[in-house]
Image (spheres, rainbow, N blue to C red):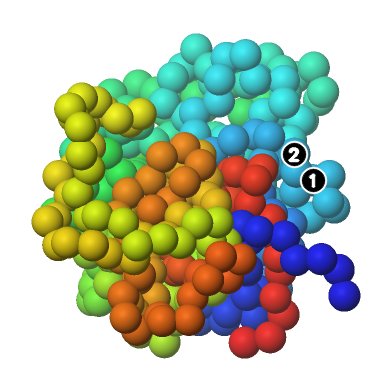
Amino acid sequence: MSEELFPRLEINIEKIFHNASTLVTRLGKKGISVTGIMKSTLGMPEIASEWLRAGVSGLGDSRIENIQTMKNADISAPMTLIRTPMMSQIRQTVRLSDISFNTEIGIIRKLSEEAKKVDCLHGVVLMVEFGDLREGIMPVDLEAMIHHTLKLKHITFMGIGTNLACRNGVAPDDRNMGELSHLADDMDSTFGSVMKVVSGGNSANLQWELDSTNHGRINNLRLGESMLLGCEPLHRSAIKGLYTNAFTLIAEIIELCEKPSEPWGNIAQSAFGLAGKSKAQGNIIQAILAIGRQDIDPEGLIPPRGIEILSASSDHLVIKVSEKHPSLKVGDHISFQLNYSALLRSMTSPFVDKVIKKKV
Ligand SMILES: *Cc1c(COP(=O)(O)O)cnc(C)c1O
């Protein structure tokens, strides 16, 4: 057996398959396809192929580098760049992705010029602003934008989309989703059935789409978090029938000692600004795990019973160990569940070993 490395992120691929296939089936009944959003996994090919096996209609990522990773691993699927392409990455965008999400006519024109060079067609979905104030064309400007986009010879206009709940937590509802559908109808009558795709949103849209008796023109969702972590991002509650524990982070104890719960000396700033006030609780059993902010978001870790996360610096995670764990010692390992933020960072950290597990 090969040596186990720590910290490690164990990835249960069967659970991820189950989550994806369950959501693809539920949404499929409503005529909604799923694009699997890979960014929080950095385009991990093993996850991409499970999602394709589960029936996602394509894969998407906000970073062209992750799409490159999947292509290098021979993942074959329609690829969508879901962040507006950088002017400096037009070349890669056209060569590596089939479709990109766009909001700037200057970028779309460059995409068309580049597609002409390689004699291909590049698909464009226009993102529309519905109040969350991240990316999106203002609805009043959409018609002019479609007009300009349709003129470009090497661009295939695919449709529209919107993204909510990412910057300001604006939730999808009958009103904004209704406006999206209405806009699709309007544009279809202006330009003549041009909307192939009406992409309603991300995992935050899931509940609305599943509960709604009328999801209008929406025929696609872009799902990442819900298929990985089995929870919906609006209230971070578990989705019925999905696994919420497909990922486990395991870190190693490098110091374990009884110490006072409160610091002493003159208190100024710590490495990450002002330290939170420590609870006065006499002496405690304090342990240090060899993992830190470079690898995880300490607020996003869910510890086992009897372990409390006290604080973290770049490379040290400080925990309090209760009487429930009398035999813990240096060299032992502690397992955590992760939220989206902690998952994203641990996937991105080169110091965290990623291990694929096959069994549920
Ligand atoms: C990240 C992202 C998604 C996926 O979001 P999840 O919450 O992980 O489902 C969808 N669309 C866009 C534009 C994104 O940036």
Q: How many angstroms separate mark 1 from mark 2 (CA)?
A: 5 Å
Can you tell which mark lies on residue 68?
2
Can residue 282 be seen from the camera position used here? yes
Do the numbered discs 1 and 2 sit on residues whose CB atoms are within 8 Å? yes
Quadrant where the image shows the C terminus: bottom right
* Image position, residue 265 (x, y; %): 20, 32
Q: Is residue 116 left or right of residue 231?
A: right
Q: Is residue 246 left or right of residue 355?
A: left
Q: Residues within 10 Å of mark 2 (few under 14, many from 20)?
A: some
Q: Is residue 210 above or below residue 83?
A: below
Q: Nearer the viewer, residue 262 or 12?
A: 262
Q: Quadrant of residue 306?
A: bottom left
Q: Nearer the viewer, residue 359 or 230?
A: 359
Q: Is residue 138 above or below residue 211?
A: above
* Image position, residue 304 (x, y; %): 39, 76
Can residue 206 be seen from the camera position used here? no
Q: Quadrant of residue 285?
A: bottom left
Can you tell which mark lies on residue 322?
none
Q: Is residue 57 left or right of residue 358?
A: left
Quadrant where the image shows the N terminus: bottom right
Q: Nearer the viewer, residue 296 or 236?
A: 296
| Residue holding disc 1 | 71
Q: Is residue 102 above or below residue 125?
A: above
What kind of residue is marked 2?
Gln
Residue found at x 47% / y 46%:
316
Q: Secondary structure at mark 2?
A: helix
* Image position, residue 301 (x, y; %): 39, 60
What kind of residue is marked 1?
Lys
Q: Residues within 10 Å of mark 1 (few under 14, many from 20)?
A: some
Residue found at x 53% / y 61%:
253
* Image position, residue 53 (x, y; %): 70, 73
Would the CB of label 2 be found within 8 Å of ligand 1?
A: no
